[in-house]
Image (tube, rainbow, N blue to C red):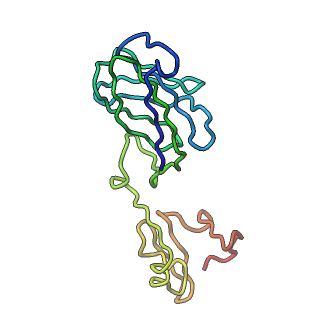
Amino acid sequence: MALVFTLLPLPVLGQVAEHEGEIEGVVRDVESGEPLAGATVRLLDTGQGAVTHGDGSFHLVRITPGVHVMLVERLGYAAQRFDVTVGESTPVVIIEMTPSALDIGGLVITGALSERGADETLRPVNVLSGQDLQQRLQSTVAATLSSEPGLASTTMGPATARPVIRGMSGDRVLMLEDGARVGDVS
């Protein structure tokens, strides 16, 4: 992850600082150099913040002189955190952000009147695959799955069994093998 930022007083750029206690800057993509609109720029110690404009620029005003911790965030990019010194001249901050993949954790969806966590669901969810599936493998699909929460089996002899999923069986349970319907679930 690369963080490139430059702090230059405006007089160095040929401009005169209008007010003391301001920070101006631009947020752009490190690879393409394109400006990033919609990035959030915040000073963590004061809570002041701004959202970048279409040209990637932002402007923070009425900042007390001193060193402040700045946090820059934008969806699809790694967050950047660094120190900015505010003094007599207005610093110009150029921030180049590195693209980053979004990390979205697993999600369990249940219908409920109020919000619940995954550990509070009324109907447990379980995945049986890989080595665990190989260890539990039995003569029929129903027998293999019968020890899982919410599943049972009805048998019609030693070689035939039908799965019962949360009380549903028969035509209400559709079984597929490689995407094709299995004619006889037993």
Foreground of the two, 64 or 110: 64
Q: In the rendering, at what x and y percent does residue 113 appear?
A: 40, 40
Give the tally of numbered discs. 0
Q: In the rendering, at what x and y percent does residue 103 appear?
A: 47, 51
Foreground of the two, 177 or 47: 47
159 on left or right of 122: right
Q: Residue at x 40, y 24 (%)?
A: 49
36 on left or right of 123: right
Q: Is residue 52 above or below residue 18?
A: below
Q: In the rendering, at what x and y percent does residue 180 appear?
A: 71, 70
Q: Is residue 45 above or below residue 21?
A: below
Q: In the rendering, at what x and y percent does residue 154 appear?
A: 50, 76
Which quadrant would the C terminus be assigned to in this image? bottom right
76 on left or right of 34: left
Foreground of the two, 154 or 116: 116
Residue 108 visible here: no
Q: Is residue 117 above or below residue 4?
A: below
Foreground of the two, 43 or 148: 43
Residue 71 visible here: yes
Residue extending furthest toward the bottom:
158
Residue extending furthest toward the top:
18
Q: Is residue 2 above or below residue 134?
A: above
